[in-house]
Image (cartoon, helix red, strand yellow):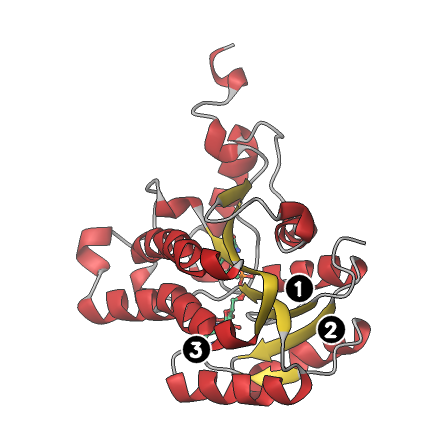
Amino acid sequence: MLLKGKKILISGLANKYSIAAGIAHAMHREGAELAFTYQNERLLKNLKPIAEDLNVDILIESDVSSDESIENSFKELKKSWPKFDGLVHSIGFAPADQLEGDFVDVTTREGFKIAHDISSYSFTALAKSAKPMLNDGAALLTLTYLGAIQTLPNYNVMGLAKASLEANTRFLAASLGKDNIRVNAISAGPIKTLAASGVKNFRKMLTQHSSRAPLGRTVTTEEVGNAAAFLCSDYASGITGEITYVDAGFNTAAMPLNEIE
Ligand code: 0WD
C-alpha cells in the first residue's frame, strides 16, 4: 500500500468520469484517507455516491475563483485534519467561446484572465492556504496537458494557461522544497470527461491520439490515478518540479511508424 497513513485532499471531482475520480480510487486502494472539495452545491449530488464508496466523510465546498471560499474551506478542513499529507489540484476552466475557432480571433482579455485564474493561479492559492497544514514530506499534484508546450486545434488559451500551470509547478517546487514539500504535475493524454467535452471536436482528438501514440490507444483515469498515487507517495521522495506524461507515449512520437511503411 503506497499511501498507508496519508491524508490527501482531492479537488476537481465533478463526477465519476473525472480524472480526480480515477485518482481518488487509486489513492483509496493504496490506503490513503481522503477528503474532497467541490465547486458548488450543484456538484455535491454527483460526489456523494463516490464519497460513500470510498469511505470519505469530509466534503467541503471550495470555489477557487474566490479567496474567501478557499480560506473557509481550509478552516473547515482544519477541524478534522489539523495536518495533512497531500493535495490534488484537478481543476481547469476556460469560457466555452475561447475553446472553439481560430486562436487569434476568439481569444479575449476576459477569457485569457479567467482561464489563467481558474486553471493556474488556483494551484498557487491552494498551496498558499495548505502550506501551514502540510506535514513534512507532503506532496502537491496538478493535472496539465500537452497544449502547454505544443499547439493543437481549439485548445487555444487553455494551452497558455497550462504553460503557466507547468511553470507554477516548478516555482512552487522551488519555493516549498526547503519545507520538504514536493510539487509535481501529470500531463494526461485526452480522456472523455465533462471538461474535455468543452473542447470542440474532442472525439477526433481521441482518434488522432490512438493512431500516433506508441501504445496505440488513449489512457484511462485509472492509469492517471496510479501515477498520481506514486507521485504523492514516499516512493517519489526524490521527484519534484516535474511534469510526468501519462499519455501512452503520444508526446514522444513525431509520426506513427505505420505512416511511412
Ligand atoms: O482530456 C482530459 N480530460 C484532460 C484533462 C487531459 C489533460 C489534463 N486535463 C486536466 C484538466 O484541464 C483539469 O485541469 O485535468 C483536470 C481535471 O479535468 P477533467 O477530469 O478532465 O474534467 P472534469 O471532470 O470536468 O473536472 C474539472 C473540474 C470542474 O468540472 P466542470 O466540468 O464542472 O467545470 O474542475 C472544477 C469542476 O469541478 N472546477 C472548479 N473547482 C473549483 N472552483 C472550478 C472552480 N472555480 N472551476 C472548475
- Residue 159: % across, % down: 34, 52
Q: Does the residue at mark 1 contact the one at mark 2 (Cβ under 8 Å)?
A: yes
Q: Amino acid at mark 3?
A: Val
Measure how far apart labels 1 and 2 are at the Cα level. Answer: 8 Å
Q: Which residue is mark 1?
A: 21
How crowded pointer 1 is (Cα within 10 Å; few <14, some 14-19, many 20+) is rated as: many
Instruction: Give the mark, 3 or 1, whose residue is nearer the N terminus.
Output: 1
Q: Is residue 140 visible?
A: yes
Q: Residue at x 56, y 85 (%)?
A: 42
- Labels 3, 1: front one: 3
Q: Of helix, strand and loop, which one carries label 2?
A: helix
Mark in front: 3 vs 2: 3
Circle 2: residue type = Ile
Q: Which residue is mark 3?
A: 64
129 up-or-down from 27: above or below: below
Q: Quadrant of residue 219?
A: top right
Q: Which mark is residue 50?
A: 2
Could you classify mark 2 by the number of other residues whose Cα lies within 10 Å: few (under 14), some (14-19), or many (20 or more)? some
**SS category of the residue bearing label 3:** loop
